[in-house]
Amino acid sequence: MTDQPLIDMRGITKRFGGVTALSGVDLTAYPGEVLAIVGDNGAGKSTLIKILTGVYQPTEGEIYLDGKKIEFASHAEAIEVGIDAVYQTLALADHLDPAANMFLGNELTKNVLGLNMLDNKKMRSETERVLMDRLGVKLKSLDAPTESLSGGQRQAVAIARAVYSEGLRVLVMDEPTAALGPQETARTLKLIQTLKAQGLAVILISHSLDDVFEVSDRIHVQRRGQCAGVVETAQSNNQEVLGLIVGAEEAA
């Protein structure tokens, strides 16, 4: 990791009417690291990453990318500067094949006799290339509907769609192993490590501390809309992180 954070969120506050969802939260993420965000339901995890990915705008606070202040009014604008997310729902069209899902809304076309036609061959080859070159994943068939794929393979298709953008620098992953079995979970964690090795800043939201301790470099703990602490994964343990999540020191 470099000394300069890729993402630097400072004093992020978000209010919804009279409810304060986030209060003065700082967060940094570096290129080539996995930053885990943990905390109970309602701790502000989702609100924080939705601000980072342009879904929400902060009430107060600033976001810097490579030291430059950035602002965006939509998720599309966040993608333009290199920040994207893969949410737990994956947002895949199950009846479509992997290539159609990867280019959904951004289909590749070719000109045939003056008409723009879908370039299915190129979309298929590009899907195969990105899955293999970026993620090390080879699907048995690109013709089958996405609903027939395993949970880990579906996750790979959703990640491939995000990393297809050459400008991607930050990928948020929201509960990527939820509802996956042990083998599929292991494959998904391997995908996260692969992305890290390619220099991306991967921000992992997870309720599984086992997964967090396996792949993360640092752990950012949210509690009641505030940052309760940030620990180096290799120098911490489940007990310390759980203590920050539930406010053990406060209770004592």
Image (tube, grey):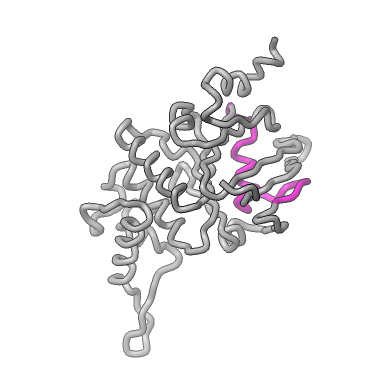
Q: Residue furthest left?
A: 140
Residue 140 in picture, x, y percent from top left? 21, 52
What count of labels does the image hold?
0
The residue lying at 55 percent from left, 24 percent from top is 236
| Vertical arrangement, residue 102 with respect to residue 195, above or below | below
At x 63%, y 22%, the residue is: 244
Question: Which residues are the magenta region?
Answer: 40-63
Q: Position of residue 231 (x, y in %)?
A: 60, 30
26 falls in the magenta region:
no
Furthest-bottom residue in this view: 113
| Coordinates of residue 147 in the picture (x, y in percent) | 30, 48
Q: Would you say residue 49 sits in the magenta stretch?
A: yes
- Asked if residue 140 lies left or right of residue 210, the reply is left
Q: In the figure, residue 13 lies in which quadrant?
A: top right
Which of the 4 image quarters holds residue 29?
top right
Vertical position of residue 230 compared to residue 188: above or below: above
Left or right, 220 with respect to 151, comes to: right
Residue at position x 40%, y 63% in the image:
103
> Which residue is depicted at the point 40% across and 47% down?
194
In front: 184, or 210?
210
Q: Residue furthest top?
A: 252
In the drawing, does residue 84 fall left or right of residue 5? left
Q: Measured from the top left, where is residue 83 in percent x and y?
A: 57, 55
Depicted 94 relative to depicted 23: above or below: below
* Residue 105 found in image quarter: bottom left
Q: Quadrant of the C terminus?
A: top right
Relative to 174, residue 102 above or below: below
